[in-house]
Image (spheres, helix red, strand yellow):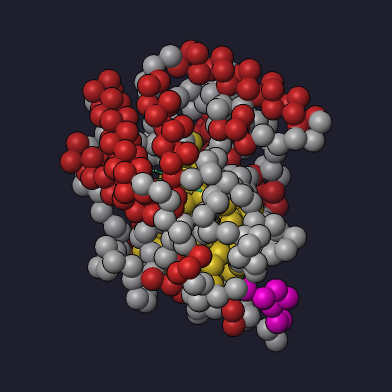
Amino acid sequence: MTAPLAIRPVPYSPAYETPEKDEAQTQAELAETLLSMSRTMYEHTGEALRSVHAKSHGLLRGELEVLDDLPAELRQGLFATARRYPVVARLSTPPAEKLDDRVSLPRAFSLKVVGVEGARLEGSEGDTTQDFLMINGPAFSAGSAKGFLRNLKLLEKTTDKAEGAKEVLSTVMRGANKVLEAVGIESATIKTLGGHPETHPLGETYFTQVPLLYGPYMAKLSLAPVSPSLQLLTDAPIETENRPDALRDAVTGFFGGQYAGDAEWELRVQLCTDIEKMPLETPDKEWSQEDSPYIPVARLRIPRQAAWDPERVRAIDEGMSFNPWHALAAHRPLGSVMRARRAVYPISAQFRSSHGRCPVMEPRAAEVAAATPPV
Ligand code: HEM
C-alpha cells in the first residue's frame, strides 16, 4: 500500500518568480562571455568545447526506473507512471578548460532520460528527452544570474592561461578547506575555486541546486549512490599526483572492473513546503532537508561498460547537449538562474555543433536503447 506523504507541498504560483533587474542585459552578457571562452579555447586547442564543464570523466548508458506506489503528489511529469527509460549520463568538472585533475573542483553529473512522453516546453517540442544537470553540493555558487556573471568575467580572463597557477591555488585552497572543515565549516566558495577534496566522483551525491516545476508543485532533485559498490566510494580519496586524468581513470576503472551487483543511485525529490523559507530566486540558499527531505522517486542503474572511449566521445561528449530546458512542461525550470540558462546553453551547443566534428542533436529512445548494455 502507498504510504501517504508526510509533508505538504506548496502549489506553484507565477508570483513566486520575480525577474532580476536588467535580466535581459545579464543574459546577453552571459552569452557573450561564455562564447568568448569557447572561442579562446578553440583558437588555442582547435577543439570546440563546452563554454563550461569542458572536461568529461565518464560517458555512460543505463536505465532509469520510476518507482511504483509513489504517493499521488509525487506522481508528476516523468514520474507519473512506473516505467523504465534508457538514459545517458556525463560526468564532468566545471571549467572551460580540460585542466589537470590536480586542480580539484566540484564534480557534476548530467542525466538525459530518453523516450519521455507528455506536453513539452517551447523549444523542445519535437524531442523526447528530460535532462537533469546536477553538481555535488545542495546550493548554487552564486546568489543570482548577475552574481554568476561577475564570477564568470573573472574566470574569462584566465581561460586557458596559467594552469600551473591554478594547480598551486587548488592545493592552497584544499589546505584552507581542511582547516575550515576541522572547525566544522564547509566553504562552497573554496571548493569552487579548486579546493574540493580529492574524492571519487561516483561516491558523491549530486543536486540540481536550483528549482523546477514538479507538476503543480516546485522541487529540487538529487541523485544519491545507494548500491554498496558506490557507497564504498563516498569520500574515498583519489591519487592525482602525475595522473592528469585521475577522475576519468577512477570512473573507467570502476565500470570496467568487478563489483558486486549493479551500480545504483536513487533519484530523489525535495518539494517546496514553505515559499518563504524555500524561495525560487535565491539559488545559493539550500532548502532545509529537515523541513522537506529528499524522497526517492526513481532508481538509476548503470551496468559494467567501457565508460569512456572514442565512440562515446563522438556520440555523447561531442554529439549531445544536456540542458535543463530539454524538458516536459511539468518540469519547467524556475528562477533567474534557470531563465539565464535557457538563453545560453543553446549558444554553447550551437558553437560546438558548427565548429566541432559532429552536429549536436537530441537522441531518440531507440538509438540509446540499442547502444545500452543490458542492466
Ligand atoms: C546562470 C547560471 C548558469 C549558466 C550561465 C550556465 C551555463 C552553462 C553552459 C553554457 C554550459 C555548456 C552547455 C553546452 O555546451 O552543452 C553548461 C553546462 C553545464 N552546467 Fe551550467 N550554467 C549555469 C548554472 C548551472 C547550475 C545551477 C547547474 C547545476 C547544478 C549547472 C550544471 C551544469 C552542468 C552539469 C553542465 C554540463 C552539461 C553536460 O554534461 O553537457 N549549471 N552550463
Residue furthest toward the right? 183
Q: Is residue 35 visible?
A: yes
Counting from the top left corner in percent of width and height, residue 359 is at 21, 47
Question: In the picture shown, does residue 170 fall above or below 117?
Answer: above
74 or 14, nearer to the observer: 14
Q: Is residue 5 magenta?
A: yes
Left or right side of 75 for 312:
left
Kindly identify the residue that appears in the image at 32 percent across and 33 percent down: 33
* 253 lies above or below 3: above
Direction from residue 344 to residue 146 in the image, left or right:
right
Instruction: Quadrant for residue 267, please give it.
Output: bottom right
Q: Residue furthest bottom?
A: 1
Residue 206 is situated, as x and y percent measured from the top left of the image, at 58, 49
Total residue callouts: 0
Where does the magenta region start and end? 3-9
Residue at coordinates 39% horizontally, 69% vertically from top-left? 328
Asked if the stretch drawn in magenta spans residue 11, the answer is no
Q: Can you give x and y, in whole percent of width and height, for residue 222 in the image?
A: 59, 56
Seen at 25% across and 40% down, the residue is 352
Quadrant in which residue 237 is drawn:
top right
Q: Position of residue 203 (x, y in %)?
A: 64, 44
